[in-house]
């Protein structure tokens, strides 16, 4: 088990990752090669269905799974941060 997050956080991230993977499958994209634009579309789509706190969880989950493979997360991009900040300010 990943020691950098609690077991309950890891479970939450795993559930969020499953949702992201399903979105990527529909977009015919490997979740580990998703670009920033795909992540932005994903978060914008999810925003219609969930609250802001859940969007932060989705973003954190993507980052967690990317980093677990030594990859740079597309969620580190300033555009993703601006999207989340903009939604927060609505």
Image: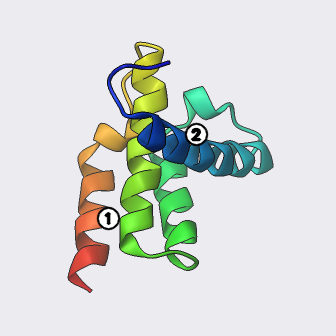
Q: Residue at x 78, y 50 (%)?
A: 26
- How far across and how far down the image is residue 69, in percent? 48, 15
Q: Is the C terminus in the top left, top right, bottom left or bottom right quadrant?
A: bottom left
**Count of number-bearing discs:** 2
Residue, far bottom: 90
Provide the secondary structure element on which disc 1 rests: helix
- How far across and how far down the image is residue 78, in percent? 23, 48
Crowdedness near tag 1: few (<14), some (14–19) or many (≥20) residues, C-alpha within 10 Å? some
- How far across and how far down the image is residue 2, in percent? 44, 20
Camera-nearest label, 2 or 1: 2
Q: Which residue is mark 1?
A: 83
Which sits earlier in the primary sequence, circle 2 or circle 1?
Answer: 2
Q: Quadrant of residue 67?
A: top left
Q: Which residue is mark 2?
A: 14
Q: Quadrant of residue 72?
A: top left
Residue, far top: 70
| Above or below for 28 versus 33 | below
Crowdedness near tag 2: few (<14), some (14–19) or many (≥20) residues, C-alpha within 10 Å? some
Distance of label 2 from label 1 (alpha carbons): 23 Å
Q: Nearer the viewer, residue 7 or 69?
A: 7
| Above or below for 79 versus 33 | below
Q: Nearer the viewer, residue 76 or 50?
A: 50
The label number, if any, that marks residue 62 in the structure image: none
Q: Nearer the viewer, residue 68 or 37?
A: 68
Q: Residue at x 47, y 52 (%)?
A: 58
- How far across and how far down the image is residue 36, in percent? 44, 44
Is residue 3 toward the left or the right of residue 27 in the image? left
Q: Residue at x 44, y 64 (%)?
A: 54
Residue, far front: 7
Q: Residue at x 36, y 57 (%)?
A: 56
Q: Nearer the viewer, residue 79 or 47?
A: 47
| Above or below for 72 versus 76 | above
């Amino acid at each position: 088990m990943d020691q950098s997050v609690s077991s309950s956080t890891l479970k939450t991230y795993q559930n969020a990752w499953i949702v992201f993977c399903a979105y990527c499958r529909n977009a015919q994209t490997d979740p580990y090669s998703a670009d920033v634009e795909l992540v932005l579309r994903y978060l914008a789509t999810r925003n219609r269905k969930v609250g802001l706190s859940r969007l932060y969880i989705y973003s954190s989950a993507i980052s967690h799974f990317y980093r677990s493979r030594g990859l740079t997360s597309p969620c580190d991009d300033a555009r993703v941060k601006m999207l989340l900040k903009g939604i927060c300010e609505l």
